[in-house]
Image: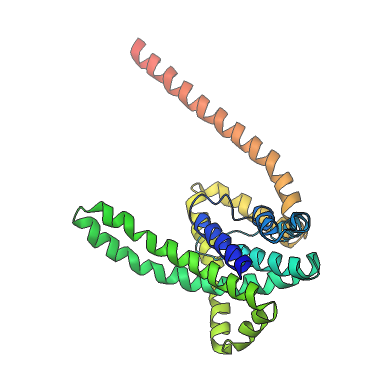
Amino acid sequence: MIQALLIAAWAGLCAIDDIGTQMLRRPLLIAPVIGLIMGDVHTSLLIGASLEVMWMGIGNVGAYSAPDIISGTAIGTALGLASDGVATAVAVAVPASLLAQQLLVLYRSSIVYLNPIAEKIAETGDFSKVYRINYIPMVIAFLIRAVPTFIAVYLGAGVVDQVVAALPKEIMSGLSVAGKIIPAVGIGLLMLMMLKKAELWTFLIAGFALAVYLQLSVLPITLIALPIALIYDLATQKAQVKEVFGQIDNDEEDYDL
């Protein structure tokens, strides 16, 4: 019971960090603390490293909610340490993270209703209340990680599969469709913020072609993109310098006249 409460509290603290500095949300940092609580740091490091490699590329892009690596790591590490180690941890972490992902979708969809409340309070000039309203999503974020983690750790691995199986198919299919649409919207919004110049879209098309037609992963595409980005940056800087000096020469000619 005490271990389950401590692990749940740690998952909740990592959840608060996830909406703040995002320094503790990675498996490589979450798992060792659970190992300290359960008295097996060595195995927890192995589990954390395995989950870190598995979820290295996962992150929230725009409005997209990725599988919850905090709940997945906390539940997977705890149950892995209590049973067979790394294999069990990985097997449990995946469904746990997917189940928690649905909770995150509901959470992030519901807290938007706090915005008009905060705007009305801000119009009164009482910004201390605006500050305090931020505690509401923090508490909810803490609970949606801490409570499922406590239940799963306290009752065992079977409860995760039972909860997933007990959810109505309509809810799961609806959340699944939303989860497929939201990434496209999130990436689209991100592209609109990042690609301010029309010629930058050619780099996006080139990366898409490398990934789809040449079947390259993220690392080789990144290594190919680095020198191209450096050359583009140098060329852009030289063009800007020439433009500045051209304006200076024109001003001097006007002055001589």
For the question of whether residue 57 can be seen, the reply is no
Q: Nearer the viewer, residue 114 or 238?
A: 114
Residue 239 found in image quarter: top right
Could you tell me how many numbered marks the image carries?
0
For the question of whether residue 21 can be seen, the reply is yes
Rendered residue at 60%/33% (across/down): 235
Q: Percent position (x, y) of residue 185?
A: 51, 66
Rendered residue at 48%/65% (across/down): 141
Q: Percent position (x, y) of residue 79?
A: 71, 70
From the viewer's perspective, tell me whether residue 72 is left or right of residue 128.
Answer: right
Can you say whether 35 is above or below 143 in the image?
Answer: above
Specify the farthest residue to the left: 124
- Which quadrant of the rendered structure holds the N terminus? bottom right
Q: Percent position (x, y) of residue 231?
A: 65, 35
- Which quadrant of the rendered structure holds the C terminus? top left
Rendered residue at 76%/50% (across/down): 220
Can you say whether 239 is above or below 30 in the image?
Answer: above
Rendered residue at 53%/58% (across/down): 13
Q: Nearer the viewer, residue 241 or 45?
A: 45
Residue 58 found in image quarter: bottom right
**Scheme by which the image is coloured:** rainbow
From the viewer's perspective, tell me whether residue 84 is left or right of residue 205.
Answer: right
Specify the farthest residue to the front: 2
